[in-house]
Amino acid sequence: MIVEGDTWEAAQANAVSLGGNLATINDKEENDWIVDQLYGRGKASELLFEKLYIPIESERGRGQAIWLGHNDLKQRGVYEAVSGEKNIYTNWMSGEPWDSQRADKSTERYTMINLHNNGVPPGTVGGVADRQYNTQPIRDRGGAHIFYGLAEIKIDE
């Protein structure tokens, strides 16, 4: 399920309120399934682009991405699943998880999955800061980068 959240914490809180957590990707097959479900015409990737893109703000909508449930808050560089799952598949994009537009990479403690193919294949994972350029002035104009998370909600069968 896609949940709102302009920060990782907000998206995680929304996932928890529904009885789940932000998603943990366990293996390549699950990663490929997520891409198949969310990337392409008429899917979340296209809908996010249409909703968020503003030509004069290059960061906004440039790369559709959504929060995942991995972070390295306990130990720098060791990503864990917020759900407690031990098997995490991270399809890191080139230069990740340490790549950043900032000189200080210490803020990149959370993960997101790309839903675009603009030089970075869909389904690749990046390490990012909690707010992803969503400063208050930018949010007042509509925001910039990540506004949603991918939640896993257990359903009773």
Image: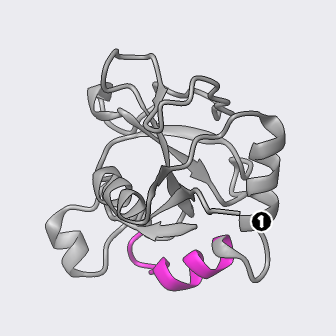
Q: Position of residue 139 (x, y in %)?
A: 24, 73
Q: Where are the magenta residues, as a range?
A: 45-57
In the displayed structure, does residue 17 sit left or right of residue 22? left
Q: Which residue is found at the position 67% from the left and 60% from the top?
A: 116
Q: Position of residue 55 (x, y in %)?
A: 47, 79
Q: Which residue is found at the position 84% from the left and 41% from the top?
A: 29
Q: Amino acid at mark 1?
A: Gln
- Secondary element under disc 1, as helix, strand or loop, is helix
Q: Position of residue 25 (x, y in %)?
A: 65, 40
Q: Position of residue 142 (x, y in %)?
A: 30, 80
In the displayed structure, does residue 118 sit left or right of residue 15? right
The residue under label 1 is 37
User: How is the rendered protein coloured?
Assistant: one colour
**Front in this rendered view, residue 130 or 16:** 16
In the displayed structure, does residue 89 sit left or right of residue 82? right
- Residue 153 inside the magenta-drawn segment: no
Q: Residue furthest left?
A: 136
